[in-house]
Amino acid sequence: MWPWEHLAVGYLCYSLFVRVFGRRAPRTWPVVALALGTQFPDLVDKPLAWAFGILPSGHSLAHSLLVALPASALAVTAAWALGRRKVGAAFAFGYLSHLPGDVFYPLLVGGEPNYGFLFWPVVPASVSEASVGFVEMVRTLFVRYVAELAQGEVSTYLAVELGLMASVVLLWLYDGAPPFGSLWSRVVVGRPADAEETP
């Protein structure tokens, strides 16, 4: 999945979760932590595999449940100790939302779900994408992505992509566009920070 797709899926699920169980819109700092969490596995694995050849795949170390679950628990525990439990929980939520996206993404492009990386290193990762160069790999994948979109036909992937993006943008605006809505209120409108910043 592309970074914006991971962010969209994570935000959609998180906003709905917070609205159902917290009966409120997502707050500024948890949304920032959520956004970082949705990108975290790729921020670790992709450079270490594609640029440095340390990992065998862009879906290995940080994508493995053997790392993701303890790392998420550590983030929650550390944030709790710092009095920012909602921030830690949002990071963990974003991190863990990333993994099912990568598992089921192949279904949208005509493939099969990919579960293997969830159990790396017990299940070995493919080494085909290691050490190819970060910029070269991103360029190759992006060219393929643009070519698929340019075909002009409304594929399942394109329909899901457009539907996901439209619904997330509308939900984000309805939520007050965090964190930018809060920043706008403080800088332009001159309102003081509200109670949303409390942990």
Image (tube, rainbow, N blue to C red):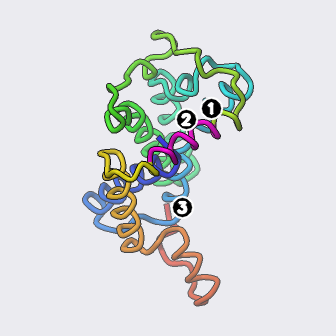
Q: What's the residue type where badge 1 is placed?
A: Lys
Residue reaching furthest to the right: 52
In the figure, is residue 46 to the left or right of 176? right
Residue 166, image quadrant: bottom left
Q: Name the spot of residue 161 as percent of width and height, x first.
A: 37, 52
| Residue 46 - label | 1
Task: For mark 2, give the secondary structure.
Answer: helix
Q: Nearer the viewer, residue 142 or 168?
A: 142
Q: Name the spot of residue 68 as percent of width and height, x first.
A: 49, 30
Task: For mark 1, give the secondary structure.
Answer: helix
Residue 96, image quadrant: top left
Bounds of the magenta segment:
138-148
47 within the magenta span: no
Marks 2/3: CA distance? Answer: 20 Å
Q: Nearer the viewer, residue 25 or 136?
A: 136
141 within the magenta span: yes
Marks 1/3: CA distance? Answer: 26 Å
